[in-house]
Image (tube, rainbow, N blue to C red):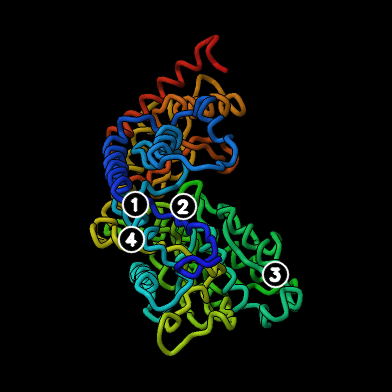
């Protein structure tokens, strides 16, 4: 039997919106207050701390079936998530090469999530802002306005996008139609032996295989050896390969070494190779007034990968790839199914941003970058880069002045590789001692370093990429390493 509305016993319709917006508003104000306190007091907390058993058990709870109050949900997040971060926003986090976020960018992420736009494209404000941030990245890199680009998840994806365009542009066939098996001569890509591991992943994902990426030796400064590169290209051509792309590195992950980008640009032009620059660590040095000369030549690249979530300190995640040839970029990825055809007016009349990468659904990454750049201006970000590089050299000088420490790799920008000497220790014993120092620094919440191996030598690694770091943090680091090294080395303490 129908009721007055003409329906037959319908169940009440539901929504995810709150029943009481006033309660949500009050809790939201509390969360924002807590967030401000969280960043204001970051220096007072440990850099990192291990989670106790009860916190780990919390993350093993089963799928929730029924609702619980939002305030209770937030309380669980505050206790079990916010209290145990990776630590990269802390001023003494120098472990892996990451940005340290900023509050304005966090607000941008919040507003982007509230607006909820899908950045696959279309005629709306978020899509225009996405393109605007890409245009700003072009200006930072000295790229022409006619160039193309897209925002992606981070550096690995930015490199994959750039190398995919390079593969298709240099394959000599229509790879999208016929596949890599139809390429008549195996393609060769070249990079230094300090190349980031994402490039191997790219070669594998592109169907070329790891052997398509030839690692070229580096010189004493850990920069790619130009003569060795030229010889390898000649050798490969004579052996029936097709040299396709040279990858220059603007800041290696191990030591921050920057290849001679001007020499690579000239060689690529002479050899008719695609010139890609992995600038995820150092491309943004181009905006630093005192150090921009270090990346001279980057403006001649065919493609550049860079990371706004590093030296622009955007909250994770946002990377960017720029492609000089906009037509080559779009033709590598564009597909237009009938449900995504453009219209002369309306929502579908805007540019389809998914035509420039692998994602159809894309988050609104641009707002957090845009807001921070508008608030602080690009000049301040350039000065912060100079500041980090100066701090890297300051730490290098502190290490050189301390008899118990030694640098083990050239210092280029802001990545310092060093170790505790130990009394007569070498090889594995010295590695064990330095590893223990690193772990105790982390467990005590003092500082976060990583370790690596450079030309066969194990070392500690400090990557100073944090806008909160101060000189006294570096003094503290050196003091604590010396203290821990001496303590661990005492009989009965080591191990």
Q: Position of residue 352 (x, y in %)?
A: 48, 78
Would you name the residue on which mark 4 appears?
Answer: 292
Would you name the residue on which mark 3 appears?
Answer: 236
Dot 4 falls on a residue whose secondary structure is helix
Q: Earlier in the sequence, mark 2 or mark 4?
A: 2
Q: CA distance from mark 2 to mark 1?
A: 31 Å
Cβ–Cβ below 8 Å for labels 4 and 1? no
Res 51 visible: yes
User: Eyeballing the image, is 170 above or below 488?
Assistant: below
Dot 1 falls on a residue whose secondary structure is helix
Would you name the residue on which mark 2 appears?
Answer: 257
Dot 2 falls on a residue whose secondary structure is loop
Along the viewing direction, whichever of 51 and 290 lies nearer the viewer: 51
Q: Most extreme residue toward the bottom, as rendered? A: 344
Cβ–Cβ below 8 Å for labels 2 and 1? no
Q: Residues within 10 Å of mark 2 (few under 14, many from 20)?
A: many
Along the viewing direction, whichever of 240 and 435 lies nearer the viewer: 435
Q: Earlier in the sequence, mark 2 or mark 3?
A: 3
Q: CA distance from mark 3 to mark 1?
A: 48 Å
Q: Residues within 10 Å of mark 3 (few under 14, many from 20)?
A: some
Would you name the residue on which mark 1 appears?
Answer: 106
Q: CA distance from mark 4 to mark 1?
A: 28 Å
Along the viewing direction, whichever of 309 and 51 lies nearer the viewer: 51
Q: Earlier in the sequence, mark 3 or mark 1?
A: 1
């Amino acid at each position: 039997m129908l009721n007055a509305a003409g329906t037959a016993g319908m169940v009440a319709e539901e929504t995810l919106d709150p029943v009481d917006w006033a309660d949500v508003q009050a809790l939201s104000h509390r969360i924002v207050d807590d967030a401000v306190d969280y960043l204001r007091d970051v220096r007072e907390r440990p850099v990192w701390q291990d989670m106790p058993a009860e916190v780990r058990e919390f993350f093993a709870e089963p799928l929730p079936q029924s609702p619980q109050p939002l305030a209770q949900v937030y309380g669980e997040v505050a206790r079990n998530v916010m209290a145990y971060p990776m630590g990269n926003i802390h001023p003494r986090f120098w472990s892996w090469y990451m940005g340290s976020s900023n509050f304005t960018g966090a607000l941008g992420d919040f507003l982007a999530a509230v607006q909820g736009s899908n950045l696959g494209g279309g005629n709306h404000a978020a899509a225009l802002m996405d393109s605007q941030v890409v245009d700003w990245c072009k200006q930072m890199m000295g790229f022409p306005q006619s160039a193309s680009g897209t925002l992606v998840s981070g550096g690995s994806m930015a490199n994959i996008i750039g190398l995919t365009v390079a593969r298709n542009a240099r394959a000599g066939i229509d790879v999208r139609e016929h596949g890599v098996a139809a390429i008549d001569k195996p393609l060769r890509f070249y990079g230094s032996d300090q190349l980031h591991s994402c490039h191997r992943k790219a070669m594998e994902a592109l169907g070329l295989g790891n052997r398509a990426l030839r690692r070229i030796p580096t010189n004493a400064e850990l920069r790619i050896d130009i003569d060795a590169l030229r010889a390898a290209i000649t050798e490969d051509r004579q052996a029936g390969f097709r040299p396709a792309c040279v990858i220059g590195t603007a800041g290696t992950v191990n030591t921050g070494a920057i290849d001679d980008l001007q020499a690579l640009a000239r060689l690529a032009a002479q050899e008719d190779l695609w010139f890609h620059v992995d600038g995820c660590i150092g491309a943004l040095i181009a905006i630093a007034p005192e150090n921009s000369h270090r990346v001279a030549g980057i403006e001649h690249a065919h493609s550049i990968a860079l990371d706004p979530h590093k030296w622009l300190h955007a909250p994770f995640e946002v990377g960017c790839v720029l492609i000089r040839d906009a037509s080559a970029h779009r033709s590598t990825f564009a597909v237009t199914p009938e449900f995504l055809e453009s219209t002369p007016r309306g929502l579908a009349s805007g540019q389809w941003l998914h035509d420039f990468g692998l994602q159809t659904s894309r988050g609104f990454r641009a707002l957090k970058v845009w807001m921070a750049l508008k608030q602080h201006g690009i000049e301040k970000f350039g000065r912060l880069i100079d500041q980090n590089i100066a701090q890297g050299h300051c730490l290098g000088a502190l290490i050189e002045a301390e008899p118990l420490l030694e640098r083990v790799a050239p210092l280029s920008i802001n990545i310092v590789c060093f170790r505790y000497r130990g009394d007569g220790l070498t090889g594995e014993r010295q590695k064990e001692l330095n590893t223990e120092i690193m772990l105790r620094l982390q467990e005590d919440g003092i500082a976060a370093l990583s370790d690596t191996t450079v030309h066969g030598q194990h070392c500690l690694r400090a990557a100073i990429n944090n806008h909160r770091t101060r000189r006294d943090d570096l003094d503290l680091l050196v003091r604590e390493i010396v203290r821990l090294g001496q303590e661990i080395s005492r009989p009965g303490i080591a191990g």
